[in-house]
């Protein structure tokens, strides 16, 4: 096989890939070997382990994981509510691991916080609770302008008829929307949200996430959401899974969906479940080839399955290497040698710079076995109904 200029996880987040398309953007959040502990002496317990994470302006990241996995701890470190103990943490161009208290205070004015606990002042109306965020960010601002902005945000989250109500006159979901408006009203560069839609019905939750989506795309606001709410996963550019204090996976959602649809075109995978396809996509490796490079050679043993993400290849066979087919984006090759155990029955050369997603023989066989198990389970289930 020809030397690849790049080999990285395909749908898992690749910081090197992101930097190439970021037009010189710096990450809004960059964690390097970040660790955190609670307690002292014999009671000291590590809760975050060697985490590395980059998030760029305009990205919406959803962080998932079991309770107690460290999600909220990571959120509070990024939000300057706790000090980073080991490793590096950069937020909005500030190195938090080396920041003074004055630095942290200045940074907090550029962050919007949305917590599960509403933390509203019972003596203040919805407008006054929201306006307080503006007063803290700009103590010298005009009250009339701040009031107008507060009511504008309350209207954006569907509370235009509750602007003068106090918390005791609001439902749990309405209080949550007031807290969301308060976290967004000062137009922060970074939004940190802990279960922002947990108390909301489907319509209210959709209103909120669409507001967040607009802020991300139109104003390049960076948004990090910790949630267990499966209803809002579609808003995410990436889904980061944290388990036992470690980032277990970091998946580009749109790319995973595209790759899953490509895989379904292959008869070998057409009966796989969406979950199985997503897991298989996460195991793909991205390999970039220059034009006119050989990918596989006829007669060699097969060790990979290939999916063409971009570019095109020529399939050649026989001593004269006659071209028998041209494959393009979304096409695939290499599965027959893995299925039969026979040598490769053709050679494949790139016709232009081409990005291929490859699956190792081990992962290919695992996917086949899991699909067979699923089909058996379905058949057994249908039989048992007779």
Image (cartoon, helix red, strand yellow):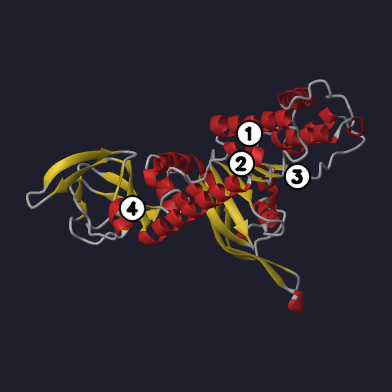
Q: Secondary structure at mark 1?
A: helix
- Residue ID at (79%, 21%): 160
Q: CA distance from mark 1 to mark 3?
A: 15 Å
The answer to whether the residue labelled 1 contacts the one labelled 4, judged by CB atoms less than 8 Å apart, is no
Q: Earlier in the sequence, mark 1 or mark 4?
A: 1
Asked whether residue 347 is in view, the answer is yes
Q: Secondary structure at mark 2?
A: strand
Q: Secondary structure at mark 4?
A: strand
Q: CA distance from mark 3 to mark 4?
A: 45 Å
Q: Position of residue 221 (x, y in %)?
A: 58, 37
Asked whether residue 135 is in view, the answer is no
Q: Earlier in the sequence, mark 1 or mark 3?
A: 3
The answer to whether the residue labelled 2 contacts the one labelled 1, judged by CB atoms less than 8 Å apart, is yes
Q: What residue is shown with label 4? A: 305
Mark 2 residue crowding within 10 angstroms, few (<14) / some (14–19) / many (20+): many
Q: CA distance from mark 1 to mark 4?
A: 39 Å
Q: Position of residue 132 (x, y in %)?
A: 80, 35
Q: What residue is shown with label 3? A: 115
Is residue 359 toward the left or the right of residue 345 in the image?
Answer: right
Q: What residue is shown with label 1? A: 212
Question: Who is closer to the viewer here, 359 or 62?
Answer: 359
- Work out which residue is located at the far bottom of the displayed protein and give it: 42
Question: Who is closer to the viewer here, 146 or 258?
Answer: 258
Question: Who is closer to the viewer here, 102 or 314?
Answer: 314
Q: What residue is shown with label 2? A: 223
Is residue 291 toward the left or the right of residue 22 in the image?
Answer: left
- Work out which residue is located at the far top of the displayed protein and give it: 161
Q: Earlier in the sequence, mark 3 or mark 2?
A: 3
- Residue ID at (81%, 41%): 118
Q: CA distance from mark 3 to mark 2?
A: 14 Å
Mark 3 residue crowding within 10 angstroms, few (<14) / some (14–19) / many (20+): some
Image height of 164 relative to 182, above or below: above
């Amino acid at each position: 096989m020809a030397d690849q200029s790049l080999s990285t996880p395909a749908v898992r987040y690749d910081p090197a890939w992101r930097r190439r398309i970021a037009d010189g953007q710096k990450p809004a959040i960059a964690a390097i070997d970040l660790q955190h502990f609670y307690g002292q002496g014999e009671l000291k317990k590590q809760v975050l382990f060697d985490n590395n994470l980059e998030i760029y302006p305009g990205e919406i990241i959803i962080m998932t994981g079991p309770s107690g996995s460290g999600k909220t701890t990571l959120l509070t470190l990024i939000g300057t509510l706790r000090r980073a103990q080991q490793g590096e943490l950069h937020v909005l161009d500030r190195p938090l691991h080396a920041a003074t208290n004055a630095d942290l205070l200045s940074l907090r004015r550029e962050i919007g916080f949305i917590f599960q606990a509403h933390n509203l002042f019972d003596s203040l109306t919805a407008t006054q609770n929201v306006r307080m965020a503006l007063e803290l960010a700009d103590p010298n601002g005009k009250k009339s302008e701040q009031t107008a902005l507060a009511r504008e945000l309350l209207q954006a989250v569907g509370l235009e008829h509750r602007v003068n109500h106090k918390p005791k006159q609001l439902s749990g979901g309405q209080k949550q929307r007031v807290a969301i408006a308060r976290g967004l009203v000062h137009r922060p560069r970074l939004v940190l949200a802990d279960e922002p839609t947990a108390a909301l019905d489907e319509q209210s939750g959709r209103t909120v996430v669409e507001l967040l989506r607009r802020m991300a795309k139109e104003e390049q606001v960076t948004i990090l959401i910790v949630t267990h709410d499966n209803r809002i996963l579609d808003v995410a550019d990436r889904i980061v899974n944290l388990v036992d204090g470690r980032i277990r996976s970091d998946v580009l959602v749109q790319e995973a969906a595209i790759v899953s649809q490509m895989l379904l075109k292959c008869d070998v995978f057409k009966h796989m479940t969406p979950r199985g396809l997503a897991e298989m996509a996460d195991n793909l490796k991205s390999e970039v080839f220059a034009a006119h490079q050989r990918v596989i050679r006829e007669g060699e043993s097969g060790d990979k399955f290939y999916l063409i993400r971009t570019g095109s290849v020529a399939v050649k066979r026989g001593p004269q290497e006659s071209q028998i087919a041209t494959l393009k984006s979304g096409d695939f090759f290499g599965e027959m040698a893995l299925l039969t155990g026979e040598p490769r029955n053709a050679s494949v050369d790139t016709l232009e710079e081409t990005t291929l997603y490859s699956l190792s023989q081990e992962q290919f066989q695992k996917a086949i076995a899991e699909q067979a198990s699923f089909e058996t389970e379905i058949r057994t289930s249908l039989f048992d109904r007779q």
